[in-house]
Amino acid sequence: MNNTENSTYRCKFDEDFKYVLLPVSYGIVFCVGLILNVSALYIFLFRIRPWNASTTYMFNLAISDMLYIISLPLLVYYYSQGDNWPFGVALCKIVKFLFYTNLYCSIFFLLCISIHRFLGICYPMKSLGWLKVRNARIISVIVWVVVASFQSPVLYFVTTSTNGENTICHDTSSPDLFDTFVVYSSVNLALLFCVPFVIIIVCYVLMTRALLRPSAASSQTSNSRMKSIKMIIIVLFVFIICFLPFHVNRTLYYYFRKLDLDCFTLNAINMAYKVTRPLASANSCFDPILYFLAGPNIRRNITLRTGITKVKNKFTSYVKENNWSSVTNGSVGDNTSNPSPCPTVITEVNATKL
C-alpha cells in the first residue's frame, strides 16, 4: 500500500499497479505519438500549400500534442522509479501544465474543426466569409491564450513533497489548498470540457440531419459526405474514449476526497482515475488519424511519398514534356499542317495531375 498522492492523508492507496501501467502506456504514447505528429508537422509545413482553415486548426492541434509528448519521458522515468521525481519543482509544474494545456487545446481545436465543418455543410453560402484562413489564425491564437490562461493556476497549485527518500510530484495540490483546487478544477470541467462537448454534440446532430436529407444528395458528393461522417465518428471517439472517462473519474475522485468517504471507496475511485489518465494522453495518437481520414490533402501527400507514385509522376512528367515538344516542333515546321492530336494528350495528362 502506497500513500503517494498525499503523504498527510489518512488513507493509503494501493497504487502498485500504476508503476507498470503508467510507464508502459506513456512510453507507447510517446513513441507512437512522436512518429505520427512529427510526420503530420512535416506534411503541414513542407507538403501542403496553401493552407485552408481546417489545416490551420489541425496544425495547431499537432503543435499542442507535440508539446505534451516531449514531456512524457520525464513521467515514464518518474513512475518507473516508484514515484520519485528528481527534476525539481519547476519541471513538475511545467509537466502538469503541459498535460492540461494539451488536453484542453485538443478539445478546443476539435471544437473549431467541428464548427468549421458544421458551417460548411449546414450554411455553405452564409458562412463563406467566416471560413477564411485569416479568421482561423485569429481563432487559434485566442484558443492558445484562453487555454493557457485557464491552466496557469496549475503552476501555482502543483507542488512536490517528500515521502521517505522519494520526492513526489503531485497531481493536485498541497492538502491545505485542495478545496480551492477542487473549485478551480470544477470551473475547468464546466467551461473547457462540458460546454465544448455539448456544442460538438449539437453540431453533429444537425450535420447528420443535413447529410441524411434527400436534398443533400444533390449538393453533397458521396466522397464529401463520407469525409464528414468519418470526422464525426473520429471526434466522438476521441471524446468518448479519451476525454469523457478521464473527466468523470477525476471529478469523482476529487469530490470523494473532499467528502472524506471511506478508504475502500477512495481507493477504488483513485484506481479508476489513474487508469483513465493514459486514455487522456492517448488523444495525442488519435489526433493524427483525424488528419489522415478527414484531410484529403494530407492523405494525398502521404500517398505521394510512396515509391510507385514517384515513378508514376516522373513518367507522367516525361510524357508531358515529350508531347509538348512534339506540338512545338510541329507548329514551327509546318504552320499549314493539320492540328496535331498531341494537345489532347496534354490535356489528359494535365487532367490526371489536377
Image: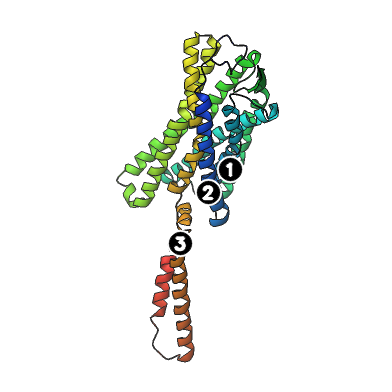
- Label 3 sits on residue: 307
Residue 295, horizontal then vertical, whole percent: 46, 49
**Residue 124 location (% of width, % of height):** 44, 48
Task: Please tell me how crowded label 3 is: few (under 14), some (14-19), or many (20+) other residues with Cα within 10 Å.
Answer: few
Q: Residue placed at 53% from the left, 53% from the top?
A: 43
Mark earlier in primary sequence (3, 2): 2
Closer-to-camera residue (179/171): 171
Q: Total marks drawn?
A: 3
Regarding mark 3 in the picture, which secondary structure is present there? helix
Q: Which residue is mark 1?
A: 63
Residue sitting nearer the eye, 86 or 126 = 86
As helix, strand or loop, the secondary structure at mark 1 comes to helix
Q: Is residue 23 left or right of residue 335?
A: right
Residue kind at label 1, given as amino acid type: Ile
Q: As rendered, which of 188 and 249 lies closer to the eye? A: 249
Which residue position is annotated with label 2?
40
